[in-house]
Image (tube, rainbow, N blue to C red):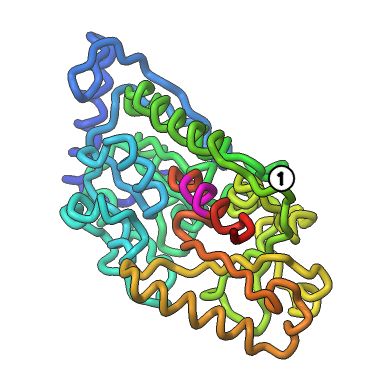
Amino acid sequence: MHVLRPASAAAAVTAVLLIAGCASQARPQAATGTPGFVPVTVTDCTGVESVVKAPPKRVVVLTPSVLELLLWLGLGDRVAAIGQQPRPGSLPPRFAAQVAAIPALSGKYTAGSGYQPVPREELLSAEPDLVLGGFSSNFEAAGAVSQADLAAAGIPSYLALSTACKSAATAPQTGFDLVWRDLGNLGRIFGVPDRAAKVIAEMRRKAAGIEAPGERPGVFPFEYDEGTATPSAPGNRQAINAVIETAGGRNVFSDRDEAYTKVGWEEVVARDPQVILVIIYDKGDPAANDARFAEAERFLVGNPALRGVRAVREKRFARLVYESASVGGVRNADAAVELAGQLRPAG
């Protein structure tokens, strides 16, 4: 397959790749000047194998979850562009200034607009030496540049394992292994394996230090912003299942071997959770988040169908934001620590 693009962009990309390839053969060297970089081959979510001959310097990242992984690894200066300006609250405040300075190829996020594919010409005009995605739609949506097209242009790509990869989630997610695999792969790609190891070690330390409650309370993870008529119940293939397990709880839908399933409220009643974990999209403002959490809890208490549910009767609600709890990433360990504190009985 051939990529149709302006001749100038094609020449520029080809030149960058040829120079990088020749340099790696003559004297392997990382982009930061660290000697000894050896070309690596990484396998992503879809089984695509990409060979990276030198640490990338101009990365296009198509989704915020993968951008965040790079930021935690101190690689924000390698990002030439992002697919779409992240929604407010989707990334930690500590990275706000850095993210604001990165060009967005598909414009600003608009509520309810969904994923906006990056047009081929725009993507290639950024002259990327690596393209990173988190969802299959990043490469497969109508109008998106496929991984096959990128490979034909000599541009390696990587679809993350930890965001929404069905082929990687072949067993119940009870820990953060997929996040660690992504961090390890990115550490190899960019020639910073020590940084990746430190981030992983810190996540492990936080998880190991959790003081779990005496019993494992049944938890219903309720993603309020996904709708209330027919709730989406996360199964055991979803990141939140790992967060709940690590925190010392039990997802009441952990018997579902899938990421999500639509259920009726009567099924939630039948499973009688001891705690309902309310999950909302982070609005980037603590007061706005508190208001949204409170709104969700009023809905639960005011829903006649749920009056017999133990969590509702006792008003045992926990709170987490989607970006740290339901998307695979470094903040999953923090979410588990936070949830563990909320699962412990009062007093």
* Horizontal side, residue 259 vs residue 47: left or right: right
Q: Amino acid at mark 1?
A: Pro
Q: Quadrant of the C terminus?
A: bottom right
- Taking depth in this image into account, of 220 and 96 the one nearest to the observer is 220
- Taking depth in this image into account, of 66 and 124 the one nearest to the observer is 66
User: Which residue is at a point 34% across and 47% down the rendered structure image?
Assistant: 67
Q: Is residue 347 above or below residue 192?
A: below
- Taking depth in this image into account, of 9 and 244 the one nearest to the observer is 244
Name the element at disc 1.
loop
Rendered location of residue 276, percent (x, y):
64, 68
User: Which residue is at a point 80% across and 68% down the rendered structure image?
Assistant: 271
Q: Is residue 337 magenta?
A: yes
Rendered location of residue 61, percent (x, y):
34, 48
Q: Quadrant of the N terminus?
A: top left
Rendered location of residue 277, percent (x, y):
60, 65
User: Which residue is at a point 27% across and 69% down the rendered structure image?
Assistant: 108
Rendered location of residue 120, percent (x, y):
32, 55
Query: Can you name the residue that lies furthest to the right here?
Result: 270
* Horizontal side, residue 150 vs residue 305: left or right: left
Start-end of magenta stretch:
334-338
Q: Which residue is mark 1?
A: 172
* Horizontal side, residue 265 vs residue 238: left or right: right
Q: Within 10 Å of the Cα at label 1, are there few (<14), some (14-19), or many (20+) other Cα atoms?
A: some
Determine if residue 184 is in view. no
Residue 10's image quarter? top left
* Horizontal side, residue 36 vs residue 322: left or right: left
Determine if residue 269 is in view. yes
